[in-house]
Image (spheres, rainbow, N blue to C red):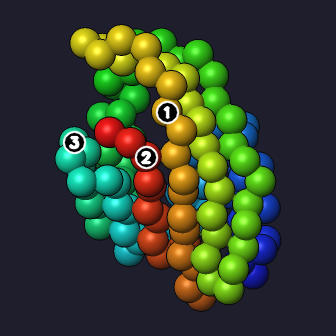
C-alpha cells in the first residue's frame, strides 16, 4: 500500500472505532508508539506492548461520549491527522482530548506513531 492508501484506510477504520483492525492490517510488528512526556506509558515497542497500553487505556475509561477524526495530510512517508475524544475516566472525571497524530510509513506499514496533546 502507498502512504496515501494507508492514510485513507487508517482514517476510515479509526472513524469506525475498528482499532484492532488498524493494528492487524496497517502496522509493522516492530512499530513504536510515543506519547507525550509524563504519560502513564510514554513509549511502547511492538504490537504486544501497544496492545497492553490499549487494554490499560480501555480499563481506565468509565464512559465513552464520542470522538472525531480529521482528514489525513500526507507528506512523503508521513501521515498527520487530528483526533478528538470525549470520555469519563475512573478517578479523573470527564475529559475532552484533542490531539495531533503523526505516523511514519515504511515498506507499506506504519512503523511509528506519535501523539501530541496537552497533559
Element at label 1: strand
Q: Can you identify the residue that label 1 sits on?
A: 97
Q: Which mark is residue 40?
A: 3
Which numbered disc, 3 or 2, marks the residue that appears first in the sequence?
3
Count the marks: 3
Residue at position x 77%, y 54% from top? 71
**Circle 1/circle 2 CB separation < 8 Å:** yes
The quadrant in which the N terminus is found is: bottom right
Q: Position of residue 14 (x, y in %)?
A: 66, 45
Q: Describe residue 115's horizontal placement relative to residue 77 as left or right.
A: left
Which numbered disc, 1 or 2, marks the residue that appears first in the sequence?
1
Q: Which mark is residue 39?
A: none
Q: Nearer the viewer, mark 3 or mark 2?
A: 2
Q: Badge 1, how many Cα within 10 Å: few under 14, some, many 20+?
A: some
The quadrant in which the C terminus is found is: top left
Q: Position of residue 93 (x, y in %)?
A: 36, 11
Q: Is residue 56 above or below residue 72?
A: above
Q: Quadrant of residue 33?
A: bottom left
Q: Quadrant of residue 53?
A: top left
Element at label 2: loop
Q: Can you identify the residue that label 2 sits on?
A: 117
Element at label 3: loop
Q: Describe residue 105's horizontal placement relative to residue 71 as left or right.
A: left
Mark 1–mark 3 distance (CA, rounded to whole Å) = 15 Å
Residue at position x 72%, y 47% from top? 70
Amino acid at each position: 500500500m502507498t502512504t496515501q492508501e494507508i492514510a485513507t484506510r487508517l482514517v476510515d477504520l479509526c472513524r469506525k472505532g475498528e482499532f484492532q483492525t488498524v493494528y492487524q492490517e496497517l502496522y509493522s510488528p516492530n512499530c513504536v508508539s510515543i506519547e507525550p512526556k509524563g504519560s502513564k506509558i510514554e513509549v511502547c515497542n511492538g504490537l504486544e506492548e501497544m496492545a497492553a497500553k490499549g487494554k490499560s487505556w480501555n480499563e481506565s475509561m468509565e464512559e465513552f461520549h464520542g470522538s472525531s477524526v480529521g482528514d489525513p495530510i500526507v507528506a512523503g512517508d508521513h501521515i498527520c491527522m487530528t483526533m478528538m475524544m470525549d470520555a469519563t475516566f475512573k478517578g479523573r472525571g470527564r475529559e475532552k482530548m484533542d490531539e495531533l497524530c503523526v505516523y511514519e510509513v515504511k515498506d507499506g506499514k506504519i512503523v511509528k506513531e506519535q501523539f501530541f496533546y496537552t497533559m
